[in-house]
Amino acid sequence: MVTGANSGIGLATALRLAADGYEVFAGARRAEGLDAIAAAAADAGATTVHPITIDVSDDDSVQAAFAQVLADG
């Protein structure tokens, strides 16, 4: 799980982990952030990056995101 993965260090980290063979759940707060993650992953050929909605300042959002990770991963 990488949060803030729609840009900057978070995105670079998610793509690097995927390139190193990891399954990556890459989080962003909004739909446009998820679109940015999906586009960058597609451009990089990173098929193991999975965009996921998460707002780390909202406990319910964190619980829902990790429930999705556990269900999918």
Image (tube, rainbow, N blue to C red):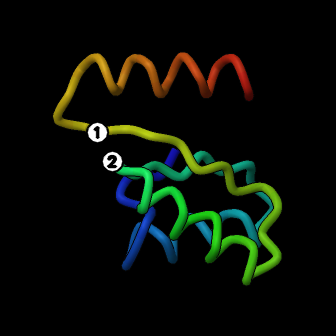
Residue of label 2: 29
Q: Are marks 2 and 1 in contact (CB under 8 Å)?
A: yes
Q: Position of residue 69 (x, y in %)?
A: 61, 27
As drawn, 32 above or below 12? above
Binning the other alpha carbons within 10 Å of mark 1 as few (below 14), some (14 to 19) or many (20 upward) gives: some
Q: Amino acid at mark 2?
A: Arg
As drawn, 62 above or below 17? above
Binning the other alpha carbons within 10 Å of mark 2 as few (below 14), some (14 to 19) or many (20 upward) gives: some
**What residue do we see at 46% from left, 49% from top?**
27
Q: Quadrant of the C terminus?
A: top right
**What residue do we see at 60% from left, 46% from top?**
25
Residue of label 1: 55
Q: Secondary structure at mark 1?
A: loop
CA gap between label 2 and label 1 equals: 5 Å
Q: Position of residue 54 (x, y in %)?
A: 38, 38
Kindly give the residue lying farthest to the front in the view shown. Answer: 32
**What residue do we see at 28% from left, 39% from top?**
55
Q: Amino acid at mark 1?
A: Asp
Q: Which of the two residues, 63 or 19, is positioned nearer the viewer here?
A: 63
Is residue 16 among what the camera can see? no
Which circle's residue, 2 or 1, is located before the other in the chain?
2
As drawn, 47 above or below 39? above
